[in-house]
């Protein structure tokens, strides 16, 4: 199944539906960011600590990776950074262009798959912002390798992703607030559930096809790519699991 194009269409629809992760920031938020008052998310709720960013973003080359939707990109641009937003869904990129036009910001958008950043030269960015999105691809290792390649030495990669524990549970029961252990990890919507379940519980619900990577691929994958993990926090995940533990993780990684 062509998950890449299915997910692209799912995100087109999410933009139409004004889904939370497709809602562009307001002009007021952009104005505040211009004055130095801003915060961004990598996970559902907790803002990224300010000491995870370089002291100044003025003139810094920032790649917002799989990060369309008019959120992180415009705020980074308003701080004075030179921003490129990269995403597979054109409608999501359209949200960034809409804010740029509305508020007079300079933002470059590039359509592409997060597993392949060949369009960018080696060592071309100072900072990569990678909010929750690698659950939409079958392998996260290529994302880390590519991020490492396009970052300058000393560059920083800020990422948000699911704690794989979220994928242990039966989806239907989880939607009803019950946690019933069912799946082995790593999880894939393509192989861990039946085609009927995929249609009914994922696609008919307007959700994209997802993959639950192992913690080893998420953490050691970054280290193996050459990064040093220099920051870590947990946040809610937005599922029934939140009653028991945080379902999402954010990391700060540095290219030495
Ligand atoms: C949850 S949103 C993340 C961006 C949003 N600004 C946020 O803060 O949550 C997930 C994003 O991943 C993008 N995406 C899904 N599959 C992708 C892929 N293979 N390559 C690049 N982007 C992809 C979607 O189009 C969507 O914009």
Image (cartoon, grey):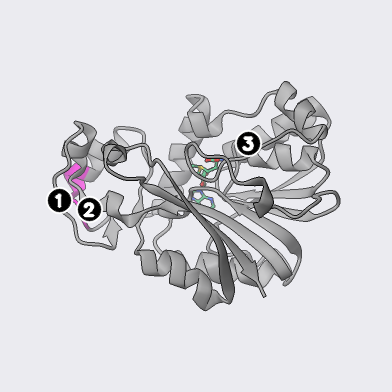
Question: Where does residue 39 sit, x and y in percent of width and height?
Answer: 65, 37
**Marks 3 and 1: which is nearer the front?**
1
Q: Is residue 193 magenta?
A: yes
Disc 3 residue lies near ligand 1 with CB under 8 A: yes
**Label 2 CA crowd tier, 10 Å (few <14, some 14–19, many 20+):** some
Q: Is residue 209 left or right of residue 99?
A: left
> Between 41 and 206, which is closer to the camera in this rendering?
41
Question: Where does residue 66 sit, x and y in percent of width and height?
Answer: 57, 50
Q: Which mark is residue 168?
A: 2
Does dot 1 land on a helix, a strand or a loop?
loop
**Label 3 CA crowd tier, 10 Å (few <14, some 14–19, many 20+):** many
Q: Residue at x 23, y 34 (%)?
A: 175
Residue 29 position (above or below residue 107): above
Q: Is residue 244 left or right of residue 149?
A: left
Let me know if residue 182 appears in the view: yes
Does dot 3 land on a helix, a strand or a loop?
loop
- Which span is picked out in magenta? 192-197
Q: Residue at x 20, y 61 (%)?
A: 184
Tell me where residue 74 sits by quadrant.
Answer: top right
> Between 26 and 107, which is closer to the camera in this rendering?
26
Q: Which residue is mark 3?
A: 71
Question: Where does residue 165 sit, x and y in percent of width and height?
Answer: 28, 54
Image quadrant where one finds the C terminus: bottom right
Question: Where does residue 95 sit, x and y in percent of width and height?
Answer: 64, 33
Image quadrant where one finds the N terminus: bottom left
> Between 229 and 133, which is closer to the camera in this rendering?
229
Q: Is there a contact, CB below 8 Å, between mark 2 and mark 3?
A: no
Q: Is there a contact, CB below 8 Å, between mark 1 and mark 2?
A: yes
Q: Residue at x 62, y 40 (%)?
A: 40
Q: CA distance from mark 3 to mark 1?
A: 35 Å
Q: Which residue is mark 1?
A: 181
């Amino acid at each position: 199944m062509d998950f890449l194009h299915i997910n692209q269409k799912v995100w087109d629809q999410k933009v139409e539906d004004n889904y939370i992760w497709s809602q562009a920031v307001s002009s007021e938020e952009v104005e505040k960011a211009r004055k130095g008052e801003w915060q961004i998310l990598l996970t559902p709720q907790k803002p990224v600590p300010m000491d995870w960013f370089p002291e100044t973003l003025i003139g810094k080359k920032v790649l917002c990776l799989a990060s369309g939707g008019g959120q992180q990109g415009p705020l980074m641009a308003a701080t004075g950074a030179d921003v490129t937003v990269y995403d597979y869904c054109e409608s999501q990129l359209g949200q960034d262009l809409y804010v740029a036009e509305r508020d007079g910001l300079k933002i470059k958008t590039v359509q592409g798959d997060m597993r392949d950043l060949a369009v960018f030269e080696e060592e071309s960015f100072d900072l990569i912002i990678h909010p929750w999105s690698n659950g939409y691809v079958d392998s996260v290792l290529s994302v880390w390798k590519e991020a490492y390649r396009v970052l300058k030495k000393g560059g920083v990669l800020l990422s948000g992703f699911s704690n794989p524990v979220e994928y242990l549970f039966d989806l239907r029961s989880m939607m009803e607030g019950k946690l019933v252990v069912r799946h082995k990890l790593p999880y894939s919507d393509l192989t861990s559930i039946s085609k009927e379940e995929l249609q009914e519980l994922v696609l008919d619900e307007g959700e994209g096809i997802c993959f639950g990577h192992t913690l080893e691929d998420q953490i050691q994958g970054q280290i193996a790519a050459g990064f040093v993990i220099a920051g870590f926090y947990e946040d809610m995940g937005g599922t029934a699991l939140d009653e028991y533990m945080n379902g999402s993780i954010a990391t700060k990684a540095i290219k030495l």
